[in-house]
Image (tube, helix red, strand yellow):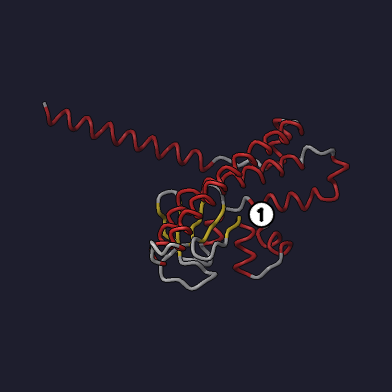
Amino acid sequence: MKFLSRKNEIEEEKRFYYLLDLEKQYKSSQKRLSDKELVEIFGPSKEMLLEKIKEWEKIGKIKENKIIEKLKIINSYKIKNRLSNFEIWVYQRIIFHFFLPELLNCIEHILRLKRLLFFTLPKHQRTYRDNFQEKIENARNKPILEIAGNYLSLKQIGDKHVTLCPFHNEKTASFYLYPQTNSFYCFGCKKSGDVIDLVRQLTGLDFKQAINYLN
């Protein structure tokens, strides 16, 4: 009986992971709507978007102040010589690892809301920029892992990917890519940005050239 019970548990577990895998495949196969398409479908008001931008700016300020506060504490220990330089470096990395992604997430929300706000403008106010704005949208939506994989050797850690930073010399990988927000951050040299910034810094292209490259 115990054998049959355990066998059933294994089968249930297999079914669970099979369904979980199907769900992931389904989500990854869905077309991601551009900001312009989202505005056209759902029609958010200018007032609502401005209010949401203010809300996220307040949240972002709280997250930023939390990081600054903790860094000040570490710095106070440095002044009092209670910690070695290596210990300070470790604590700083821990702070950035746990708290910086939350701040970056806020910044991403604000930038996205501002892009949505642009598309709420009457067409005659944005026609001259509309085509290039769409190119920017297409470029920004290019998967950062796909682009980075052409230049860097990536290692997956949970929902993130890590590699040696291409912008400064290091022996321990501290360059993180976040596919969920399509962004990157180096805990060593502090460089950060989206997929457009990554292309610019890897190739030396200017903003317009990077947009065209990604398109």
Give the amino acid type for the residue marked by disc 1 in the picture. Ala
Q: Position of residue 157 (x, y in %)?
A: 40, 53
Q: Would you name the residue on which mark 1 appears?
A: 139
Quadrant location of residue 170? bottom left
Question: With respect to residue 61, does 95 lie above or below?
Answer: below
Q: Nearer the viewer, residue 191 or 116?
A: 191
For image coordinates 48% across by 58% down, the residue present is: 176
Question: With respect to residue 25, does 145 lie above or below?
Answer: below
Residue furthest to the right in view is: 124
Q: Position of residue 28 (x, y in %)?
A: 51, 43
Left/right placement of residue 60 relative to residue 188 reads right
For image coordinates 66% across by 54% down, the residue present is: 139
Quadrant location of residue 47? top right
Left/right placement of residue 62 relative to residue 174 reads right
For image coordinates 60% across by 43% down, the residue present is: 60
Q: Nearer the viewer, residue 38 or 164?
A: 164
Question: With respect to residue 99, does 168 lie above or below?
Answer: below
Where the C terminus falls, by quadrant? bottom right
Where the N terminus falls, by quadrant? top left
